[in-house]
Image: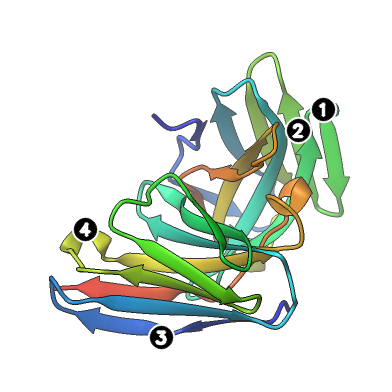
Amino acid sequence: DAGITQSPRHKVTETGTPVTLRCHQTENHRYMYWYRQDPGHGLRLIHYSYGVKDTDKGEVSDGYSVSRSKTEDFLLTLESATSSQTSVYFCAISESAGGNTGELFFGEGSRLTVL
Amino acid sequence: DQQVKQNSPSLSVQEGRISILNCDYTNSMFDYFLWYKKYPAEGPTFLISISSIKDKNEDGRFTVFLNKSAKHLSLHIVPSQPGDSAVYFCAAISSGSARQLTFGSGTQLTVLP
C-alpha cells in the first residue's frame, strides 16, 4: 500500500469556521491531489500540486486553498466552511502528471461535516 | 456538464455470472481510460486501464472494452465474486500537459451469493 495518511479522518465543524485537512505521504511522489466525493458527482478535483510550492486549481476550487511547503505534506484549507463543503475528501499522489497513465494512489479519506 | 458519465448508479449480479459496467464520454481529447474500485471507508484503488489506441485490455477476470466511435467503454467481470461488490468509477485522461483525471459518478456493484 502506498504510504498516504490523511488527518483528521472525521471532523464535524460549524459553518464559518476554518478547517485544515492534512495529507502526508512517504513515497516521495511529486504530484499530490485533493478530491472530493459526493453522491451523483463521483470524484472531483479541487486542487493539485506538481512540486513544493507549485499548485494549481482543479474543477471545484472555489472556497478552498492549498499549500505545499514540503514534498511529503499537502494541506487543504477551507477558510470559512459552508454546508455545501460537507463531503468526503480524498488525497491522492502520483509520480507523474495524472500518473501519466492515470494510476493515482489514494488515501483513506477524510469525512467532513459542516453544520 | 459531465464529460464522463456512468448512467447506472447500481447493478446487481448473481455470483459466477458476468458483470458489465458501462461508461460514456463526450470529450474527444481523452486518450486514456481507467477503472477504479472503491470499498466503503477506503480510498479508490486502480483496477485496469486502456489506451485509446487499443480496443480491449484484459487482466485476469477483468476486461475493459473501448469503442471510440461510440465514445463508450465497458468493464466486464467474469466470473463475478461477492468480493467484487464495490463502487466502480470510470475515469479518463485528456491529452495535453495537465493530464488530470476526470471521473464518472460511479456504479455500485452488488454480487449476490
Could you tell me which residue is drawn at 48 percent across and 76 percent down? B41
Residue A72, percent from left and from top: 64, 79
Output the chain of dot 2: B
Q: CA distance from mark 4 to mark 2?
A: 36 Å
State the residue in front, A19 or A107: A19
Label 3 residue SS? loop
Output the chain of dot 1: B
Could you tell me which residue is drawn at 68 percent across and 50 percent down? A98
Note whether A111 is above or below B77 in the view shown.
below
Q: Amino acid at mark 2?
A: Phe
| Residue named by callout 4 | A84
Label 1 residue SS? loop
| Residue named by callout 1 | B55
Residue A66, percent from left and from top: 44, 66
Q: In the image, are marks 4 and 3 on the same chain? A: yes
N-terminal of the two: label 2 or label 1?
1
Q: Nearer the viewer, mark 3 or mark 2?
A: 3
